Amino acid sequence: MTTTRVDDVTRAPSAEPRPQTPGGGEPGEPTAPPITLRRVLAPVSGKIALTALAGVIAAGFSLLPAIAVTALAEGAVAGTLTPRAAWLWLGAVVVGLTLGHLIGMSSTSWAHIVESAFRTELRLTIARHLSRLPLGWHTNESSGRTKVLITEDTTAIHSLIAHFGTDLGAAVGGIVLGFAYLFTRSWQLATVLLVWVVLLLVFTAAAMALAQGTVNEDYLEGMKRVGSSTVEMVDGIATVKAFGLAGTVFRRFDDALDQYTDAAYRYMKGPGRPIALLGALVSPAGMLVPVLLAGTWLAGLGVLRPVDLLPFLLVGLGLPSGLLNLLMLANQVTLGVEAAGRLGALLSEPVLAEPEQPAPIRRDADGGVSVELDHVSFRYGARDGEDPLPLAVEDVSLRLEPGTVTAVVGPSGSGKSTLVRLIARFWDVESGSVRIGGTDVREISSAELLSHLGLVLQEGGTLADTVRANIALGRPGATDAEVEAAARVARIHERVLALPDGYDTVLGSEGAHLSGGERQRIALARVFLADTPVLLLDEATAQADAHSEREIQQALARLAAGRTVLVIAHRLSTIVDADQVLVMDHGRLVERGTHTGLLAQGGLYAKMWRAQQ
């Protein structure tokens, strides 16, 4: 099978500018040029050209039978046809039909193989690129739209690669070679036929453009809305039904389907009428009328012999059929071009830069790793055309020492989770610096950074894989005993044994659905197994019941010994023993101290504490 690499589509210089925000660069720094349609299709452009050349060659061989039949007829009428010449011309008919068909079919089959390999590699490239994009990009894009990019848009380029080259070569080659032959027979009748075909094409193209308007855009937008609505309905069905909102969500889904159906109807109807009319006019029956009228007129003038009409009947009647195929393919090609443009825009999104010469993370004498934020500010990227968003984190400075537990609290939207993600370098800061072990995170390789961080987010994410594999993500190659020991520490071992296949149960399969708290404990077991010097826990017990929370807190206390721990907590009772408490409000660090000291200050922390008692 033909293998097509598309890695070079997204390959960028090593000195890539650091993005200030998701999708942006630091002020004054150059940005990489956008990935255009030409760059997206660059790995297969040569192969598309080869299929076009094959189409021209196939068209030439397909023309040979008409030339041979004309020669046979002329020889028979003139009485000059010899048996040897007759057999030669009959052989030319067989060769032309056979080779024209074989070359055309082989070219189309090969183009499909190329397209399939390219589409597979393109999806892998997109997946790799998505994995390197800042999380902010994913929060700005719905999962439904991302699905359309990976599935529908990569499929939409099928016609560009698998059909366009061969059909274009066959159509253009057939018309050029066909008219070249017809002009040798009668330039007058060939000119009349050429003018007729050009007028038909101009009329059809204008009618299609007028009928189509913004139909393509509406069709694609409708497809995206259906994808987003489907994901919303499926992913949130439990919440939706619990709050009695099923009707609202289903109505949105139904509205999206209606809009898509309407756009799809207009998409098919718009160019359908002019193409149908052109199909009738350029069909053999439709072309017969101008050929006979013009031929009879020219024969009456004495400039055309009746036998000279034969090649126009054999060749001229079928000449425009290739262009009709191209027009019928035009909509699919247009969709493919637009899809390739969107894929190029996606692949142009800047990734977080990797340092040319990564610096190591330094540990102290006891093996601990410090974390420091120095006047850090950050804002999420606004969509194109929108005003800049306010700072999510503003001028925050703090230091986390090895062997200490630091709690971050504050109202919703105060910047707590953003702070944790900046330490893990989900984004690069707008100003200031984040240092792990004294080294700026932008100077540390991603692999090195993540090998020192244990991160548990509120969502407690799991993969559609076995429980064992989900936990072993923390340390690939861990033994079964080590995986089970981590599960025991996270208080999830007994629940795993109750699953149909224990640790070999695939999460999400029948009978293997875990609650939010259980998924969070799987994530905790993963962190326990990773045994990293820095722990970042974003509401690590938010979805656990009271009994499980106490057990997890005890496990966390054991795990935190000698490590640098940052905990985000909404329940303040869980962090009263923290070495320091940081209070965030509107992106700023407004209070800092111990639980007892902050209560004595009577500020925001004390107010939050009283509200929870």
Image (cartoon, rainbow, N blue to C red):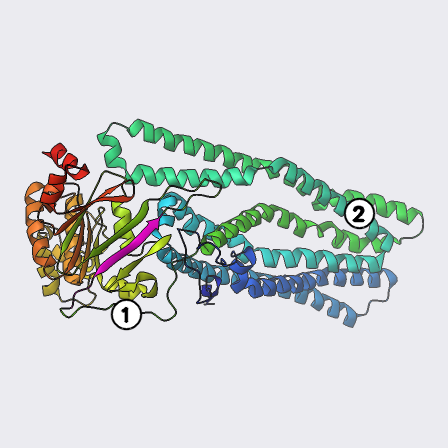
The numbered disc on residue 360 is 1
The amino acid sitting under disc 1 is Pro
Residue placed under numbered mark 2 in the picture:
195
Name the one closer to the observer, 520 or 468. 520
Q: Nearer the viewer, mark 2 or mark 1?
A: 1
Label 1, secondary structure: give it: loop
Q: CA distance from mark 2 to mark 1?
A: 73 Å
Q: Which residues are magenta?
A: 367-378
Q: From the viewer's perspective, is 474 left or right of 50?
A: left
Residue 382 lies, in percent from the top left, at 42, 43
Query: In the rendered view of the protein, which quadrant contains the N terminus?
Result: bottom left
Q: Position of residue 284 (x, y in %)?
A: 71, 46
Write down the quadrant of residue 207 in the picture. top right
The C terminus lies in quadrant: top left
Secondary structure mainly formed by the magenta segment: strand
Question: Is there any visible trace of residue 563 in the rendered image?
Answer: yes
Q: How many marks?
A: 2
Query: Which of the two residues, 109 or 468, is positioned nearer the viewer here?
Result: 468
Question: Can I make out residue 488 in this image?
Answer: no
Sequence order check: which comes first, mark 2 or mark 1?
2
Question: Nearest the camera: 400 or 257?
Answer: 400
| Residue 441, magenta (yes or no) | no
Q: Identity of the amino acid at label 2?
A: Val
